[in-house]
Image (tube, rainbow, N blue to C red):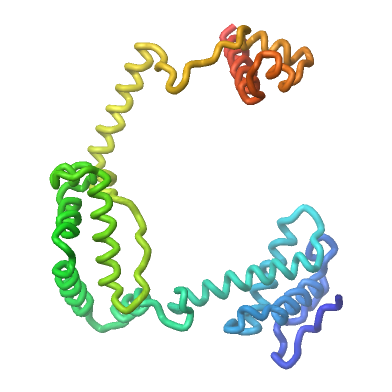
Amino acid sequence: MKPPTGSNEFGPLLPRPAVDDHVAHGYTATQVNALAVWAARECNWVNGMEMTHRAETAWEAITEHLHLTHERPEETELIAIGWKAMKAQHYQDLRAHGFGGQDQSVLSRAFLRYWTSASAPTHGHEDLIVDRLALAQIWRALTPTQRDALRALAEHGDRTAAARSLNLSDGAFCSALTRARHRFLALWHEHEQPSRLWGADRPGARHQNPMKLLRQRRRKARQRARRVQTGPRARIGRPRRDLGVSDAEILARHEAGESLNALARALGTCRDVIQRRIATARDERAERAEAG
């Protein structure tokens, strides 16, 4: 494959190097330029990206990869790296111009809202008024159960406490809350595709109050200290199965050459149990060695 030269009907894409210096792994500056130009011209899925911008983006990615990799890459690999960089840069350019949504031909509402407010001579109150009116209209459109669920969560800041205040089970409250949120988003984005539910119920007082965080840490520290004084915690789950031999003996037999599968068949268990017993025995032996 012979890469094209540095100019065609699009004009000169990259300046010709004054000196054909060695870049890395046997590639020269002229070869890097040619590969970047090839990648720019053959990349048909970023048609909105100017040709020179494509070549410069591919050149930067190819040059960086040559300096970072430890093995000589093939020309096809370098061209693919240039394509990947152009695609990422293309999406970044779209987002910078407000076209980062699913429909890349429509400006995002958040982009318009931000730049309309930032470019205005004075801050307008239209968005705040519209939001408050929309909230009042949507609130009246919700069912009483949905309004109660949203109001209880806002007042208590915790799903369990909110469910108890409404005399509902946790499952019933979560179902009512989910239906209320879906209904709210559908009305808020009326005639549009509603956004998906995201985030979690994390009241600011729980995560931003320094004193509350400090009290939580102190309480956990006291709990850990009590556990140390009272001894190790009881094992959670099924009791440990007695295989008739100790973990140290299983480790000795394994180190003597007996395989994990053979030990499992001899002791009537599975390979994973034998592997865990051997790991436990090795940890205990290491602890004894450090203590001694």
Relative to 128, 115 lies left or right: right
Whether residue 20 is visible, yes or no, is yes
State whether residue 44 is above or below residue 23: below
In this rendered view, identify the residue nearer to me: 97 or 12: 97
The quadrant in which residue 177 appears is: bottom left
Where residue 49 appears, as percent x and y from the top left, is 59, 82
State whether residue 54 is above or below residue 286: below
Relative to 236, 184 lies left or right: left
Residue at image coords 82%, 78%: 3
Relative to 267, 193 lies left or right: left
Where residue 132 appears, as percent x and y from the top left, is 17, 71
Where residue 185 appears, as percent x and y from the top left, is 29, 67
In this rendered view, identify the residue nearer to me: 75 or 256: 256
Q: In what quadrant of the picture does the C terminus appear?
A: top right
Whether residue 290 is visible, yes or no, is no
Where residue 287 appears, as percent x and y from the top left, is 58, 13
Relative to 56, 104 lies left or right: left
